[in-house]
Amino acid sequence: MRIVFLGSSLAAGRNGVGDYIRFLSAELARQGHACLALGLADTEDSLDEHEPVVRIDGRRPWSQRLLHARAAVAGFAPDWVSLQFVAYAWHPRGYAFGLADRLAPLLKGRRRHLMFHELWLGLNRRDRLVNRLHGIVQRRAILGLHRTFQPQLVHAQAPAYVATLAAEGIAARRLPLFGNLPVAPGDRRATQRRLLAEHAPQLTAEGVVFAGWFGTIHREWHGPELIARLAAATRAAGKHLVLLSLGRTGAGGAALVAALRQSPPVETTIIELGESAPTDASQLLGALDLALTANPVALVPKSGTVAACLDHGLPVLVSRDDWRPRGAIVVPPLAEPQVIFSPAGTPIDLASVLALRRQPAPRLPAIAAQFASDLTAVSV
C-alpha cells in the first residue's frame, strides 16, 4: 500500500504525534509499504527524502501550503490519506472548524483514514465548567470534521474514546499505542549498580526494588498514597525501595518529589534524574522492576509514557479512577495484563506485580501490522 500521513508538525523529538507518524511510517516501510509524511503546520520548510518527510512552514498562507502539499501527494499517488488528528494542533483552543475543507484538495480520489489521538474537553464527569464549555465547541468542530472528511476507516487508541465515538454514531476501531522511546540494548543489572554507586552506595542491587515514573505527573494523582503502599510491600519483602523520577515530569513531578523528600517513606530512596538522551532514557527505564503512572485507568491506553513502559517489559501500577465519561457511555475494562489497577487503601501483592515483568520487546511492529491489516480489510 501507499499511504500519506497528514499531521501538523513533524519536528523530530518536539511533537508527540509527529514522532508517532515518523515511527509508524518507518515501520510500515520496513514491512513493505510506501509512506510519505506531511507536516502542514510545521516550524520550517524541509524535505527528508530518506524517511520520506515533507515539512511545510505553518507561517505560510494555507494557499501556499496546499500548493506544496498537492504536488507532494500527486507525485506520491497514495492509496490512502491518513489524518492524524489532535484538535490543538490546528487551532490554539482546539476549534478545528474548516480543516476538512482545507484538506479536500489532497483527498480527491483517495481512501481516507482518520486517527483520533484526542477528542474534546468535558468528557469527564468531573471536568470544570470552563472545560465543558470549550468542549461543546470542540465537539461541534470534530463531528463536523468527521462528516466532511468522510473517512472509510476511523481509529482511536483508548477504549473510552471508541465508546464515546460510538455514542456519536461513529464506528471506530481501537489501534493500541506504541511507545515513542526505542528500546536500547543494555545490561539491566549493570545500570542498577551504576545508579546505586552514584546515588546510594550503601545499597546493593540484589536488595532493592527499583520503581519509578516517566514523563508528566498530573497534580490530580495522589502519588504519595500509592508510593506509601508500595514501600510497605517492599519492606515486607525485606527489600529497600528506590524510586526514579525520569523525563520531563513538569510542576506535578517537582511537587511530588518535594512531598516525598519532606516525608519520605521508611526504607525508600528517591533519585531525580530528569531528561536524558533516548538511549540513556531507555536503559534507565529498562532498569526498573515496575513503573507507576499518574494517569487515570480509563486513559492509560492513550498514554505514551505507559506505552514506553510496556515496550520495556514493565508492569505498571495505576491508582487513579477519577475519569468517568458523561452520560450512558460504558468504558470496557482495561485489557492490558501488565497494567495493574491498585485502588487507594488496598495492599499491593509485590510478588505478583514483579512476576508480570517481561523482556523488553517493542510493540510497534505488531501495531503497524494491525494498522495495515485494517486498511487492507477496508480496501477489499
Image: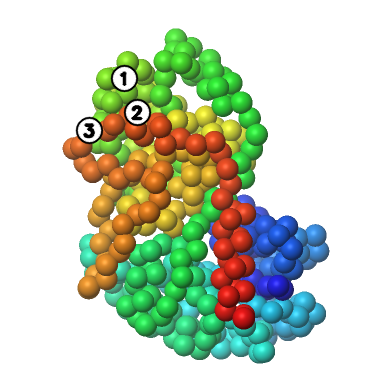
- Type of amino acid at the residue the image marks with label 1: Ala
The residue where tag 2 is placed is 351
Identify residue for label 1: 237
| Location of residue 17 in the rendering, given as x and y in whole percent from the top left corner | 56, 61
- Residue 306 horizontal side relative to residue 344, left or right: right
**Residue at (55% x, 22% y) in the render:** 189
Residue 220's mark? none
For this view, does 308 lie left or right of residue 77? left
Between residues 298 and 174, which one lies in front from this camera angle? 174
Locate residue 153, reporting x and y percent.
53, 77
The answer to whether 72 is drawn above or below residue 221 in the figure is: below
Residue that badge 3 annotates: 347
> Disc 3 vs disc 2: which is toward the camera?
2
Q: Secondary structure at mark 3?
A: loop
Query: Is residue 156 visible in this depiction of the protein?
Result: yes
Q: Label 3 amino acid?
A: Pro
Q: Is residue 159 left or right of residue 72?
A: left
Q: Are marks 2 and 1 in contact (CB under 8 Å)?
A: yes
